[in-house]
Image: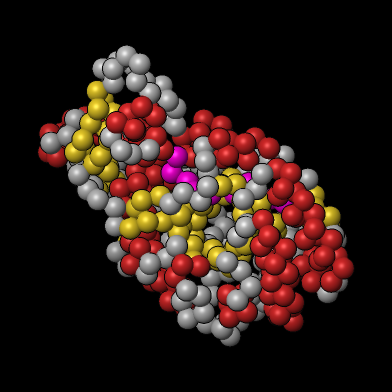
Amino acid sequence: MDIHVVQPGDTMYRLAQQYGVSMERLLQDNQLPDPSQLVVGQTIVVQYPELTHIVRAGDSLYSIAQMHNTTAAQLLRNNPALQGRDLLYPGQVIVVKYASRPRGTLSVNAYAYPTVDRDLLRSTLPYLSLLTPFTYRFDEEELIPLRDEALVNAALQSRVAPVLHLSNLDRDERFSGELAHELLEDEEDQKELIEEIVRTADRKGYQWVDVDFEFVQAEDARAYARFLSRLRRALAPSGRPLMAALAPKTSASQPGRLYEGIDYHLIAQSVDFALLMTYEWGNLTSPPMAVAPLPQVRRVVEYALTEFTPNQLFLGVPNYGYDWTLPFRQGSRARSLNNVEAVRLAWNRHAAIRYDEQAQAPWFRYVDDQGGEHEVWFEDARSIQAKLNLALDYGLYGAGYWNLDRPFPQNWVVLNAMADIRSEM
């Protein structure tokens, strides 16, 4: 796999000639909204098929996979134009194997709202080990229902393990330390909530459980770890692993409401896995900067590895960016946007995309119709490659994407080139 950074005068036709691949292959792998609108500084992923299969009448993905000693899921990953479907026609060229070899193996999780576009979900499921519908909330000892059946069933049909996600979002959809505190100080409520979690997982077919309590109060740190430990024991008879999503700490004593109630040392002993939420340095209310600058992400991983084993850890990966108005003013809010939209915005505003080598993230500035200046930071093939390399360098168990609801075709191509996807079913 190569990642080409678009230069002035580049066209998809010229890139196909330059790299010795078909233009059809470039278009299928990158799924650009308009291939004629290339932005200086945007990325184009180039892959080199090593083994292909020409579809004959009667072929299916399963039969082709058997013939070449691979899996139907791997064929879907190698051929993103299939969009997750077994829709073949005679004469179609299917990539069985690429020339590049993955660096290692990762379990891949992605969060998704129940409203996620079904075509987007179907096309992405082949790249996942786990799918986490967002989110079950609770009121004292009761789970608040979630319309998750379609996502759970789609995951199971694709042999992707669905994950029951429990959060301390309140009625206003804000993470509430007080809501967590009320649960953590009442062991009877915890017992009843844990029993309902197990019943719900049994009834709906969930294979894992993920707990994401944020802004846990400092005095509740031990109680939170004890709750996780109780839940883990309750899940053990069914073989369901427990994961906790954790604020991105860089030291045990890190100050701040987001960090003080999250004790990595205690939690490491209370769960099977942890997702490091290594994003949101650049956020809705921050000054303009990368969402997940690599030096900061690395510091979180290195601290986490002092308490967790590599096989316990998932690296959080953002699937979004932000558009800030300049000059930045305290109290102002950025606009969230997806990574495909960011490139389209650069095209529409005649902006060249630049790349911050330290943060390992793309960015650009543009002027809006009212003459206001903006700064945009987002993710591209280079920044995703850097994050996945970090996860593989440290031997982490997996990567977890927030979230699946936004299209980012290049991400999945880069992931497939860099890692074998572990099955959790």
Q: In the rendered image, is residue 224 in sight?
A: no
4 or 347, which lies in front? 4
Find the residue positioned furthest to the bottom: 253
Q: What residue span does the magenta drawing correspond to?
A: 126-137
Q: Residue at x 65, y 48 (%)?
A: 206
146 is higher (above) or lower (below) than 32 = below
Residue 125 position in % (x across, y down): 49, 40
38 or 26, which lies in front? 26
Q: Is residue 251 left or right of residue 202?
A: left
Q: Residue at x 46, y 67 (%)?
A: 311
**Colour mode of the rendering:** secondary structure
73 is higher (above) or lower (below) than 128 = above
Q: Quadrant of residue 60?
A: top left
Q: In the rendered image, is residue 219 in sight?
A: yes
Residue 24 position in % (x across, y down): 25, 27
Residue 97 position in % (x across, y down): 25, 39
Q: Quadrant of residue 198?
A: bottom right
Residue 12 position in % (x across, y down): 22, 33
- The number of callouts visible is 0
Q: Residue at x 70, y 49 (%)?
A: 201
145 is higher (above) or lower (below) than 329 = above
Q: Is residue 53 left or right of residue 62?
A: left
Magenta-drawn stretch contains 380: no
121 is higher (above) or lower (below) than 416 = above
Q: Residue at x 35, y 46 (%)?
A: 416
Q: Is residue 4 left or right of residue 146?
A: left
